[in-house]
Every structure is written in C-alpha cells, then in structure tokens.
Image (cartoon, helix red, strand yellow):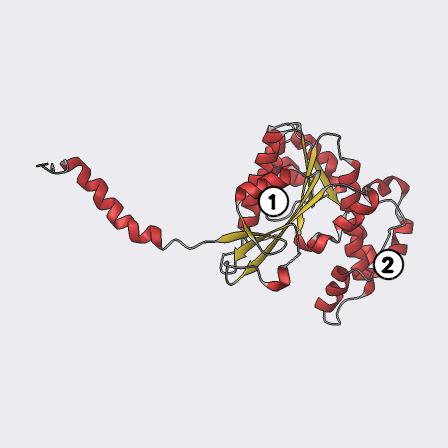
Amino acid sequence: MSITRPLPLRALPVLFMLFLAGPALAQVRQAYALFDAKGRAIGHKQLLKRTAEAEVVLFGELHNNPVAHWLQLVVARELAAKGPLVMGAEMIEADDQAALDRYLRGEIDAKGLDTLARLWKNHPTDYAPLVDLAKANKLPFIATNVPRRYARAVSRGGFEALDTVPEAERAWIAPLPIAFDPTLPGYVRMLEMMEGHGTPNMVKAQALKDATMAHFIAKHLRSGARFLHFNGSFHTDFHEGIGWYLARLRPGLRQFTIATVTQEQLKRLDAEHLGRADIILVVDATFPGSY
C-alpha cells in the first residue's frame, strides 16, 4: 500500500498563487492576429520565414498603432540577425538624410536629430527604436519620402509645379516626369474617401510620395541585402502605390507586403481585407492608439 506524503509547507504559497492566477490567465484577451492574403490564420514563424525570402519588405502600418510598431521592431531584429539589411521609412524626408546619417554615425544625439530634421511627433516612441537598431548594428537607414513642400505644391498645381524645383533639389524627388495612372483602384478609392472634397491633384501628390519612396528603395537596394521599408498601409495596400512604382523600376523584384488593419473580431479576416497584402496584421479595434 502506497502512502501519499503531504506537500511541504513551502509549496503551499506557490500552489495558492497558481490557483489565483488560473482564472486570470484563462481570461487573457488576444490583441492581434495574422492572416495571409487568402484569410488563412498564420503564426509568427511563418511571417518571419516569408519576410526573409523577399528582397524588399514593405511593412504597412497605421501610424498610431502600437502593435504594428512593435511587430516592425520584431521583424527588423529578425532580418538584421539573418544577414545584410537596409532599412528605410516614409516618416523621414529625403532632404533630412544628411542629418539622419550624422545621427547614425554618432556625430549628433537624438536631440540634435530632432533639431535638424522634421521628425514626426511620435518618432521618439514609434520610430526611434527602429533607427537606433540600425545605428547599433551599423545598418543604413534611408529617408525615402519626398519633402512635404513639394507634395503640397503638387496638391495645389499638379506635377507641373515640380518644373520650378531647382536642379540641386531634384535629388530629393523621383526622376521627372512622374508616371501616373489615375485609374489604379487605390487612387480611385482615395478620391471617393474624400467625398467630393478631394481633387485629382491631391491624388497626384500621393503618387509623388509613392514614386519617390520607390525611387529611393530601388536606388539603395544592394546585392545580397534585404530592404525593409516602413510606410502607411495605404501606400502599399493591394500591391499598389510604392509596389506599383517598384515593379516599373525593378521588374521581377521579390516584393513582400504587410498591411495593418483593425477589426472588432480576430477569428477571421473580414472580406474587405482579403488580398490587401501578403500578410495582414489584424489588431483588436479597441486597442488604444499611441496618439
């Protein structure tokens, strides 16, 4: 006959804590989910595997979404560990590249960069960790966006407004003339979303941004290295925008896109998001924004 020995007294506090934690752990709510373009749920390993197979990864975000910014950092760290990597972002404009390079080389600190460059208000929380990852690993970080003054000029006067840009400053813009297809669904939707308040020139300003970001990505592609780019999802949704221009510049380039959306439920991908990207990051709609 076996005799069951009583548990030592020191084990009782541990068991008591597990008993209390059990219900709490069971009530943890999922904050996000990952799906492929066809709406099939996937895990992190598949996400990281597929990004590693691409030449260019276009990570589309919602600018105030903390989950997207966290996953961007996860992907960046993973790709940096796998081999040569170049990073770039919409959130820094091309004419601030010199200041950014000084920061990456350690010649100025974060305050100096903020003084010299036109950084977004959420740079310290959302983009500085990405730039600092590049700095720590001695990786290039490319300011890909067109200076906003040129986008504003196009939104008022069309592409013709770029004819007066001084030759030296044209280095910060995609080569002229800018190719433009107003029938692309993304540009059509942009006008529809403005509900009559938008103009064709405003769509051209968006195209100027897309073309310029694609130009700088293509310019800084390096043989054997991946390029990881961060941008608003609208710039790459449904493989348009930046992707459309990249395909014109580099036919056959292995592009991989990630989009960020919010939904009320995370069990399945809503029909409107099918095909939005190669992988869609779905965040619980109740998750608070960073600003």
Query: In the shown orientation, is residue 203 left or right of residue 83?
Result: right
Residue 77: name its quadrant: top right
Instruction: Judge by depth and name the residue closer to the eye, 168 or 146.
Output: 146
181 relative to 254, above or below = below
269 relative to 60, above or below = below
Which residue corresponds to the image point at 14% horizontal and 38% vertical from the top-left?
7
Q: Quick check: can you spot residue 62? A: no
Helix, strand, or loop for circle 2?
loop
Which residue corresponds to the image point at 57% horizontal and 35% vertical from the top-left?
78
**Residue 203 in picture, x, y percent from top left:** 79, 60
Query: In the shown orientation, is residue 180 left or right of residue 48?
Result: right
Query: In the shown orientation, is residue 31 left or right of residue 150?
Result: left
Q: Which residue is mark 2?
A: 158
Q: Amino acid at mark 2?
A: Gly
**Residue 41 in picture, x, y percent from top left:** 54, 52
Q: CA distance from mark 2 to mark 1?
A: 30 Å
Q: Which residue is mark 1?
A: 123
Residue 270: name its quadrant: bottom right
Q: Quick check: can you spot residue 36? A: yes
**Residue 153 in picture, x, y percent from top left:** 82, 55
Mark positioned earlier in the residue sequence (2 or 1): 1
Pointers 2 and 1 in contact (CB under 8 A)? no
**Residue 201 in picture, x, y percent from top left:** 82, 61
**Marker disc for residue 60:** none
For the N terminus, the image quarter is: top left
